[in-house]
Image (tube, rainbow, N blue to C red):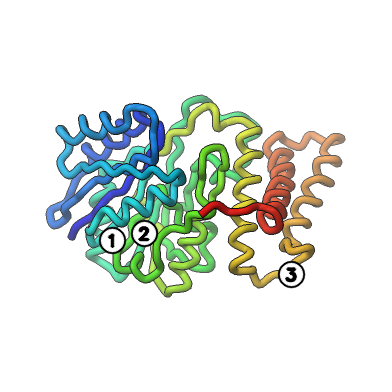
Amino acid sequence: MRLDVVIPTYNRQQSLSRTLGSLQKARVPSGLSVGITVVDNNSSDDTRLVVERWGQELSGVSYVYEKKQGRSFALNAGIQATSGDLIGFIDDDEEVEESWYETVYDAFTSGDVDFIGGPYIPNWEVEPPNWLPRKYCGVIGDIQAGDQIVPFDESYPGILMGGNAVLKRAILKRVGLYMTSVSRKGKKLLAGEDEDMYQRLLKAGAKGLYLPHLRIFHHIPAERLTKSYFRRWCFWRGVSSGVLDRQQPADVRYLFGVPRYLYGAAARGMFSNVASVFSSTDASYRFTNELASWDLAGFFYGKHFYSPEV
């Protein structure tokens, strides 16, 4: 069995080195061969030199340059540059657990499965603030769905996140490459490519599992622990959802082209925050209420005004 690990990267030479170091420490089981492809998404730092240095210490490391900016472009370049039975995706600000390869191998040799994903354990640069909203933990990549193996299906409380995922190449050939018009580009924190891929996988009848032991440790820098970052992320995530909704509307009630539940969530949040002026409601709850309005604003803009770049 051949696994190709694809790492998209942009101007993160130091954290990329930590990512590659964790892959070096991870145990590779007998029967699994591993290749590592770093896709440089038009970096201006010493990313290429970092990859070349690691290529002397870690076998199977290759470098791919993708000039067109955007995470999906980098992911697709990595898919097209590799040929293994399995394709794994991790990000350049993550470190895998030492048993990561073993978990991958066990999953694809012991059961009928097309894709797997696992938890993101936060590695905090600074102590998280008291206003941090647990409902929006995906903003910073703190994603944990419990300690039990559960199927990825319509009842799963989330999606397959592309920073800790492994898919059979055969299923990717069926569903196609990552969508490029809703992928993060520069300061536009678009975040729809994983959601789109996940929905296509389910529609194709692919079988997926959330594996609690497929763990990565996600570095969360201090600059992401600001309210302004959360507001921007929620707005652009909403834009991504609005763009996707143009192509595949949900089976819900709409008002002015937007699902009515988004209006309801925003209205309840605003009223609750007004009422909390006279109560001792905690900061996390109040900020969660506020972010519902940014979700709504982003979706409305994405559905009616945003012009996707392809």
In the picture, the disc for residue 116 is: 2
Q: Is residue 249 left or right of residue 128?
A: right
Mark 1 to mark 2 CA distance (whole Å): 8 Å
The crowding category of the residue bearing disc 3, from other C-alpha atoms within 10 Å (few below 14, some 14 to 19, many at least 20), is few
Mark 2 to mark 3 CA distance (whole Å): 32 Å
Tell me which amino acid carries mark 1.
Answer: Ala
Q: Quadrant of the N terminus?
A: bottom left
Residue 186 position within the rendered picture, expressed as x and y whole percent measured from the top left: 52, 38
Sequence-first tag of 2 and 3: 2
Residue 94 position within the rendered picture, expressed as x and y whole percent measured from the top left: 38, 38
The crowding category of the residue bearing disc 2, from other C-alpha atoms within 10 Å (few below 14, some 14 to 19, many at least 20), is many
Question: Which secondary structure, mark 3?
Answer: loop
Q: Is residue 199 above or below residue 227?
A: below
Q: Is residue 151 left or right of residue 28?
A: right
Find disc 1 in the rendering and name its residue: 107
**Residue in the foreground of this view, choosing between 173 and 264:** 173
Question: Which secondary structure, mark 1?
Answer: helix
Q: Is residue 253 left or right of residue 131?
A: right
Determine the residue positioned at 28% across, 33% down. Answer: 48
Tell me which amino acid carries mark 3.
Answer: Arg
Residue 14 position within the rendered picture, expressed as x and y whole percent measured from the top left: 35, 27
Single out the mark in the foreground, 1 or 3.
3
Find disc 3 in the rendering and name its residue: 253
Sequence-first tag of 1 and 2: 1
Q: Is residue 4 visible?
A: yes
Determine the residue positioned at 58% across, 54% down. Answer: 308
The crowding category of the residue bearing disc 1, from other C-alpha atoms within 10 Å (few below 14, some 14 to 19, many at least 20), is some
Question: Which secondary structure, mark 2?
Answer: strand
In the picture, the disc for residue 293 is: none
Single out the mark in the foreground, 2 or 3.
3
Q: Are marks 1 and 2 in contact (CB under 8 Å)?
A: yes
